[in-house]
Image: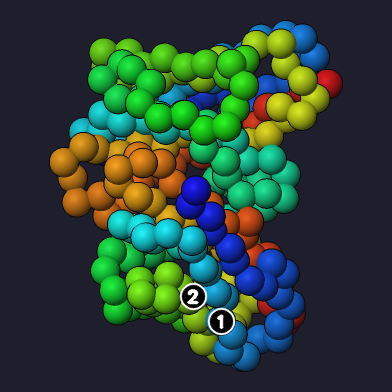
Amino acid sequence: ELKVEQNPLFLSMQEGKNYTIYCNYSTTSDRLYWYRQDPGKSLESLFVLLSNGAVKQEGRLMASLDTKARLSTLHITAAVHDLSATYFCAVERVRDDKIIFGKGTRLHILP
Amino acid sequence: DAGVTQSPTHLIKTRGQQVTLRCSPKSGHDTVSWYQQALGQGPQFIFQYYEEEERQRGNFPDRFSGHQFPNYSSELNVNALLLGDSALYLCASSGTGSSGNTIYFGEGSWLTVV
């Protein structure tokens, strides 16, 4: 059974600092997603990572994928308050036709 | 180009009642998946519809059922509502044969069972 684990689950950090969220998954996957969710809102797609060594960056966020280690990271550079949200990692195996989500990381950035 | 649209956005039901949630996929998409997100949790896969048939199902009881129409839109039905069914219900659409780079989620339907 495919399982996805994120850590940390809660993170409080100050503006200007760097930090990394980790996502481990239990079996081989075809696609890995990162989503952002603001309170009371739906999911906003951030990144889709398809292959080993894939790295994508958007603003202060950078995601990477190591399929051999079954690990993805979401790195936050020089955090700003607007990045406060819950971040989900999700893994898809095409043959299963479904996405399995991690429990999410609640990120709170102090101004 | 409209994305994934869901209705209603919010609703309140009483225990034991039945509810129907609706989803229209993004233009060009033919596959619809439904997820339940309880407060403070990650979304949980309910089921997926393709070619009007349920193709994959998560660990949800038979009280949860669905349907897909020829125009690819979909409904999620929940019977005999329990307090624990209170959640955000998300619809996601995707296209077969696509690169699969992005699965699109709707804004969700907030269900409160009282």
Regarding residue A38, the answer to whether it shows in the image is: no
Nearer to the camera, A111 or B32: B32
Would residue A82 be found to the left or right of residue B31 on screen? right
Q: Residue at x 59, y 27 (%)?
A: B60
* Amino acid type at image mark 2: Leu
Q: Are marks 2 and 1 in contact (CB under 8 Å)?
A: yes
Q: Which mark is residue A74?
A: 2
Q: Residue at x 56, y 81 (%)?
A: A20
* Amino acid type at image mark 1: Thr
Q: Which mark is residue A40?
A: none
Identify the subunit bearing mark 2.
A
Percent coordinates x, y for residue B2 in the rendering? 32, 36
Identify the subunit bearing mark 1.
A
What residue does disc 1 label?
A20
Q: Residue at x 73, y 30 (%)?
A: B86
Indicate the secondary structure of the residue bearing disc 1: strand
Residue B50 in which image quadrant:
top left
Count of residue discs? 2
Would residue B32 be found to the left or right of residue B106 on screen? left
Residue A72 in which image quadrant:
bottom left
Residue A97 in which image quadrant:
top left
Percent coordinates x, y for residue B12 in the rendering? 74, 21
Percent coordinates x, y for residue A74 in the rendering? 49, 75
| Circle 1 residues within 10 Å: few <14, some 14–19, many ≥20 | some
Percent coordinates x, y for residue B72 in the rendering? 29, 21
Indicate the secondary structure of the residue bearing disc 2: strand
Q: How far is the residue under mark 2 from the one under mark 1? A: 6 Å
| Circle 2 residues within 10 Å: few <14, some 14–19, many ≥20 | many
In the rendered view, would you say A24 is above or below B101?
below
Which part of the image, by quadrant, shows the C terminus of chain A?
bottom right
- Sequence-first disc among 2 and 1: 1
In the rendered view, would you say A89 is above or below B20?
below
